[in-house]
Amino acid sequence: MKKHQAFYEVIHTTGRDNVLRTSLREKIGLTQELANEEAYRKAFSADGISGWIEEWIERGMPETPGELNESLRRYVDDVLSNLNQLFVRP
C-alpha cells in the first residue's frame, strides 16, 4: 500500500472517494432488489468502512492495511459487545 500511497492520496484529495464507496457497496451486494431494511444495513456497513479507509488515507496511511483491518475489527467487536448500552433509555 505504501508504494501506492500517492495514488490513494490523489483519489482522496480529488474527491474520488465515491469509487471506493461504490465498490464496497457492490462487494457486499447492495442492490435495488433488497428489502429496505437489508439495504439500509448494507449501506451503513459499506459507508462506515469506506469512511474508515478515507480517514486512514487523510492521515497519511500510518498503519499497514493489516493493522487498519485489525483496528476496524477491534472497533466492531467493541461496538457489538456494548450494543445494549447504546439503546438504554434514561
Image (cartoon, helix red, strand yellow):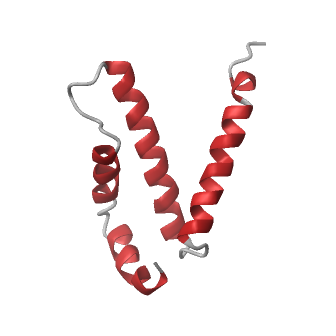
Kindly identify the residue that appears in the image at 57 percent across and 67 percent down: 66
Q: Hey, which quadrant is residue 68 in on the image?
A: bottom right
Kindly identify the residue that appears in the image at 57 percent across and 59 percent down: 69
The extreme right residue here reads 90
Position in image of residue 19 (x %, y %) = 28, 58
Position in image of residue 41 (x %, y %) = 43, 30
Q: Is residue 70 left or right of residue 78?
A: left
Q: Nearer the viewer, residue 12 or 19?
A: 19
Q: Nearer the viewer, residue 87 or 79?
A: 79
Position in image of residue 64 (x %, y %) = 57, 73
Q: How many marks?
A: 0
Position in image of residue 2 (x %, y %) = 48, 83
Vertically, is 10 above or below 28?
below
Q: Hey, which quadrant is residue 25 in on the image?
A: top left
Q: Nearer the viewer, residue 11 or 74?
A: 74
The extreme top residue here reads 90
Vertically, is 54 above or below 9?
above
Placement of the C terminus among the 4 image quadrants: top right
The extreme left residue here reads 33
Vertically, is 24 above or below 57?
above
Q: Hey, which quadrant is residue 39 in on the image?
A: top left
Kindly identify the residue that appears in the image at 73 percent across and 33 percent down: 81
Kindly identify the residue that appears in the image at 74 percent across and 16 percent down: 88
